Image (cartoon, grey):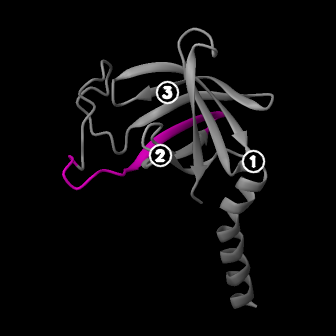
Amino acid sequence: MRPLLTLSLLAAIAATPLAMAQDGSPVGLWKTIDDASGKPTALIRITEQQGELQGKIEKLFRAPNEDQNPKCVQCTDARKDQPIVGMTIVSGLKKTGDEYTGGEILDPKNGKVYKSKLTVREGGKKVEVRGFVGMPMFGRSQVWLRQE
């Protein structure tokens, strides 16, 4: 009986990311893609705490000749000169209908913080993340790809 219980528990744990993807949850690991080159730039882990989403950078995809552990030298808040890997760049998003709104996103390349919203696409396989100034029409969107 004990092996069957253990096997059932392991199967449930392994299926959790798939279930999240199928139910349209943005919680999970996401790959960001550079707009210009089309190459992967980072892995972002989105979590939910007390009804709010936040996203931390888990990994950067950097060329061998680039600094593998860069710091946010352009940041102007508490993240200034902090390592980008491990940094929270998405925060405060709350579910509003079919979207998550009311949050902020940091662009570590320029240190700017933008208002943001997030929309789950294709049943949880992709998310569209929009950063903007003022109103959503004054911004740009990126599509992130689910990794687990």
Residue at 38%, 38% in the rendered image:
87
Q: Which residue is mark 3?
A: 105
In the image, residue 120 sits, relative to residue 102, either above or below, namely below
81 left or right of 112?
Answer: left
Q: Is residue 22 above or below residue 71?
A: below
Q: Residue at x 71, y 54 (%)?
A: 21
Looking at the image, is mark 2 or mark 1 earlier in the sequence?
2
Quarter of the image that includes the C terminus: bottom right
Q: Nearer the viewer, residue 39 or 3?
A: 39
Q: Amino acid at mark 3?
A: Ile
Q: Could you tell me which secondary element the residue under label 1 belongs to?
A: helix
Which label's residue is closer to the chain start, 1 or 3? 3
- Coordinates of residue 126 in the picture (x, y in percent): 66, 46
**Which residue bears the numbered disc 1?**
122
Pointers 2 and 1 in contact (C-beta within 8 Å)? no
Q: Are marks 1 and 3 in contact (CB under 8 Å)?
A: no
Q: Which residue is mark 2?
A: 38
Alpha-carbon span between mark 1 and mark 3: 22 Å
Q: Residue 1 versus residue 78: which sits nearer the camera?
A: 78
Magenta span contains residue 65 = yes
**Foreground tag (2 vs 3):** 2
Q: Which part of the image, by quadrant, shows the N terminus? A: bottom right
Q: How many marks?
A: 3
Check disc 1: other Cα within 10 Å, few if <14, some if 14-19, many if 20+. few
Q: Give the magenta range.
A: 49-67
Mark in the foreground, 2 or 1: 2
Sequence-first tag of 2 and 3: 2
